[in-house]
Image (cartoon, helix red, strand yellow):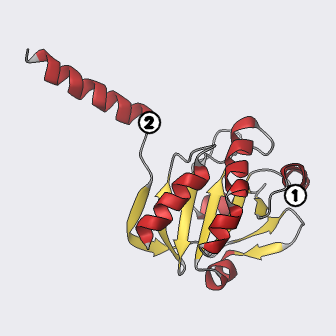
Amino acid sequence: MKAIPCLAAVLLASVVLIAGPAAVKVNPPYDAPATEGTDQEGKTVKFADLYKANPFVVVYFYPKADTPGCTKQGCSLRDAHEDLTKLGVKVVGVSHDSVAEEKAFSDKFKFPFTLIADKEGKVISAFKVETMKNGMASRQCFIIKNGKVVWHDPKAATDRQADEVKTALAELK
């Protein structure tokens, strides 16, 4: 009978290792990177200005525009955009794609938010987002409040991204 609790512990540990770290409220909050990038229209976006102008900024990272998981992640945030806006949220997506790829992705799926083309990896690096061997960002999400990172999901969801952000915002208020 003693083997059952040991087996349960091994199974639980396996689930944690497979699932990876969960999204967490950051305690203590830390300064959000005051970096800048180029959006899908070719315009410079200064992150510090976004932090000053919005109660909350959601910065989500995705590997590649117009791929299945990245599309689900973006569409989740698109479909919840009105609700998120009412909560004072500005959404910004970041990937290793070019301006043209981000523009095509945004236009195709009618994203009402900014996408940053980070071909050089400057924004990805500033947020300390892990990259794959080809330079693509891992899927992650951050919530910034008053210029501070207050929540981080190192294993961001695809089709549930907006729900996770809403849950986090409710906990942060």
The answer to which quarter of the image holds residue 10 is: top left
Left or right: residue 20 versus residue 123 is: left
Q: What x and y, as percent, mark residue 33?
A: 58, 72
Q: Residue at x 22, y 24 (%)?
A: 8
The relative height of residue 8 versus residue 111 in the rendered view (above or below) is above
The relative height of residue 49 versus residue 159 in the rendered view (above or below) is below
Q: Which residue corresponds to mark 2? A: 19
Q: Residues within 10 Å of mark 2 (few under 14, many from 20)?
A: few
Q: What x and y, as percent, mark residue 157?
A: 57, 45
**Quadrant where the image shows the N terminus:** top left
Q: Which residue corresponds to mark 1? A: 99
Left or right: residue 121 versus residue 44 is: left
Q: Nearer the viewer, residue 158 or 116?
A: 158
Q: Residue at x 63, y 57 (%)?
A: 60
Q: What x and y, as percent, mark residue 160?
A: 58, 46
Q: CA distance from mark 2 to mark 1?
A: 32 Å
Q: Residue at x 41, y 45 (%)?
A: 21
The relative height of residue 74 versus residue 29 in the rendered view (above or below) is above
Pick whichever of labels 2 and 1 is earlier in the sequence: 2
SS for callout 2: helix
Q: What kind of residue is marked 2?
A: Ala
SS for callout 1: helix
Left or right: residue 30 versus residue 15 is: right
Left or right: residue 24 versus residue 6 is: right
